[in-house]
Image: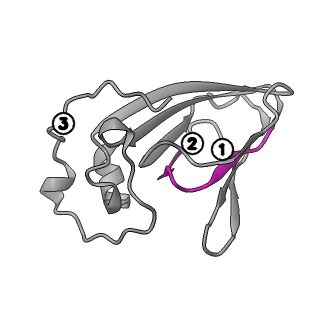
């Protein structure tokens, strides 16, 4: 995830030495709202773990553009992975039938540091993009 994140989001360089992963299970009529929020991450990877045929209804994910105020809703089908800046406001729509399981992985810097929104960056050299950070785990969990 780190090299792909550095390629898509060069502003996260230096804020991607730590990882935190967790799973979530969304159930119909139990998990009715995950209001708009941002993540405690530089980059978030969210994978729908349902298998094809393990249908569910509802559960789109909405992303909110801070500048244009545009809202995009994506279908979060089985096997789909979403990767985005943790600073992008987003929300999950309710599950209306069955359940959805997700794996979420966050990248962030030491002691939970994340980049400031809107910082300009320069292209990253491929060697630097694929380099493993020198930092060791700091045992800091975002929550």
Q: Are marks 2 and 3 in contact (CB under 8 Å)?
A: no
Q: Nearer the viewer, residue 89 or 113?
A: 113
Q: Are marks 2 and 1 in contact (CB under 8 Å)?
A: yes
- In terms of sequence position, does the residue under pointer 2 or pointer 3 come before the other? 2
- The residue range painted magenta reads 82-95
Residue 73 lies in the magenta stretch: no
User: Which element carries disc 2, helix, strand or loop?
Assistant: loop
Tell me if residue 86 comes above or below residue 31 in the rendering: below
Residue named by callout 1: 76
Residue named by callout 2: 80
Which residue occupies 13% across, 55% down?
A: 127
Residue 91 lies in the magenta stretch: yes
Q: Quadrant of the N terminus?
A: top left
Residue 18 appears left or right of 73: left
User: Which element carries disc 1, helix, strand or loop?
Assistant: loop
Mark 1 crowdedness (10 Å alpha carbons): few <14, some 14-19, many ≥20: some
Label 3 or label 1, whichever lies nearer to me, is 3
Which residue occupies 21% across, 63% down?
A: 124
Q: CA distance from mark 2 to mark 1?
A: 6 Å
Tell me if residue 20 comes above or below residue 63 in the rendering: above
Place of residue 59 in the rendered image (x, y in percent of width and height, measured from the top left): 74, 41
**Residue 108 has which mark?**
none
Q: CA distance from mark 3 to mark 1?
A: 34 Å
Place of residue 83 in the rendered image (x, y in percent of width and height, measured from the top left): 48, 49
Residue named by callout 3: 135
Mark 3 crowdedness (10 Å alpha carbons): few <14, some 14-19, many ≥20: few
Place of residue 116 in the rendered image (x, y in percent of width and height, measured from the top left): 41, 60
Residue 100 appears left or right of 12: right
């Amino acid at each position: 995830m780190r090299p792909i994140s550095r390629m898509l989001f060069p502003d996260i360089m230096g804020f991607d030495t730590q990882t935190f992963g967790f799973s979530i299970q969304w159930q119909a009529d139990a998990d009715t709202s995950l209001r708009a929020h941002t993540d405690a991450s530089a980059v978030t990877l969210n994978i729908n773990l349902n298998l094809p045929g393990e249908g569910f209804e509802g559960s789109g994910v909405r992303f909110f553009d801070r500048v244009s105020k545009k809202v995009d809703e994506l279908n979060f089908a089985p096997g789909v992975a979403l990767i985005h800046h943790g600073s992008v406001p987003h929300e999950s729509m309710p599950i209306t039938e069955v359940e959805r399981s997700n794996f979420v992985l966050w990248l962030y810097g030491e002691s939970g540091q994340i980049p400031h929104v809107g910082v300009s960056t320069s292209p990253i050299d491929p060697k630097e993009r694929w380099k493993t950070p020198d930092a060791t785990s700091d045992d800091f969990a975002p929550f």
